[in-house]
Amino acid sequence: MDLQLQGQVALVTGGSKGIGEAIVRALLAEGMRVANVNRSADEGQALEREYAERGQECSFIQADLSDADSCQRAVQTALDRFGRLDVVINNAGVNDGAGLDAGAERFIRSLQRNLVHYYLIVHHAREELIRRRGAVVNIGSKVAVTGQGGTSGYAAAKGAINSLTREWALELAQHGVRVNTVIPAEVWTPMYAEWLATLPDPQQARRDIERLIPLGQRFTTAEEIAAMVVFLASPRSAHTTGQIIYVDGGYTHLDRKYVPPAVT
Ligand code: NAP
């Protein structure tokens, strides 16, 4: 299927690693031009070089998105480099464990890392998105609906992202701009590996989690998240907006006691 994205421009936050990197690669595979806004530089610059050698644009913009001014600069830089912006993918975030005991400063910091930049990127891009009748895809988390324990800031941010998906979809519908959210649950990425490494027996913990995922007893791949994101970014999903879509092998909603029958 031609997703009709050839030549369009996407801004992706946190596009240098994990789910974001898979999204960047999937958008480029559809012939899009990409502005990758990321804090650390090495992987982003390497991606830019890799695609430049193939004649494709994967422009790296360095920014710490937890700083409000950086969000404005990132959008402006993308517009200056490409002259247009059709798609925003809000992806950067960190499950930073600011729990009930963390207090005001860490809680607010967690919202700055996980929520405020989602708003600011769309705020600064809105006029251009309206001009292009573009699309926004947010990356949320199952934690918004399941909770996790010990991570109030992240849970609050991801819950708010679900709410903003509905709010922005409605506000922007009159302009033909669509807004959707993709929810991962268990995806093997650098962030996930770091978290698992904090547990007493990471290998056993991984097996225990995999057993709870109904479809295939395995983690979702970052590429499987990216495939849904690209579809939602594309005109092929022209009548889909305000949706919160779980790409999680059934983990969030199906019965986690399910055990597949033994293969004989
Ligand atoms: P990851 O492996 O840590 O990658 C995140 C990327 O975002 C990194 O490149 C990181 O850059 C960048 N980033 C983070 N904070 C940033 C900031 N303040 N400014 C600029 N760049 C920033 O994480 P991931 O697992 O792919 O997660 C991506 C998204 O999926 C997040 O929103 C996360 O909440 C969500 N999610 C993931 C899972 C999962 O199972 N992995 C589950 C549910 C939801 P640095 O190199 O500077 O760190």
Image (cartoon, helix red, strand yellow):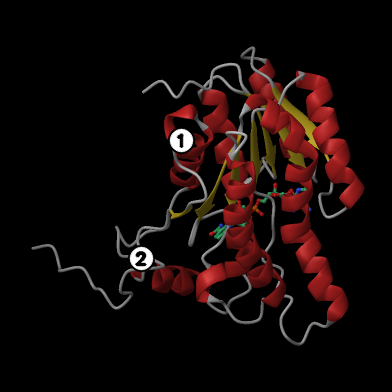
> In the structure shown, which secondary structural element does the residue marked by tag 2 occupy?
loop
Q: CA distance from mark 2 to mark 1?
A: 24 Å
- What residue occupies the far front of the structure in this picture? 174
Q: Quadrant of residue 22?
A: top right
Q: Residue at x 29, y 78 (%)?
A: 257
Label 1 within 8 A of ligand 1 by Cβ: no
Location of residue 263 in the rendering, given as x and y in whole percent from the top left corner: 13, 62
Please tell me the numbered disc located at residue 231: 1
For residue 67, the mark is none
**Mark 1: which amino acid?**
Phe
Q: Given the image, on which type of amino acid does mark 2 rest?
A: Ile
Viewer-side residue, 201 vs 113: 113
Crowd class of label 2 (few under 14; some 14 to 19; many from 20; radius 10 Å)? many
Give the crowd class for mark 1: few <14, some 14-19, many >=20 residues within 10 Å. some
Q: Position of residue 170 (x, y in %)?
A: 59, 49
Q: Residue furthest top?
A: 55
Q: Residue at x 46, y 33 (%)?
A: 238
Q: Which residue position is annotated with label 2? A: 213
**Residue in the picture at 49% in, 38% down:** 232
Is the C terminus in the top left, top right, bottom left or bottom right quadrant? bottom left
Q: Is residue 240 above or below residue 167?
A: above
Q: Is residue 215 left or right of residue 157?
A: left
Location of the N terminus (image quadrant):
top left
Residue at 50% over, 46% down: 222
Q: Is residue 126 left or right of residue 204?
A: right
The label nearer to you, 2 versus 1, is: 1
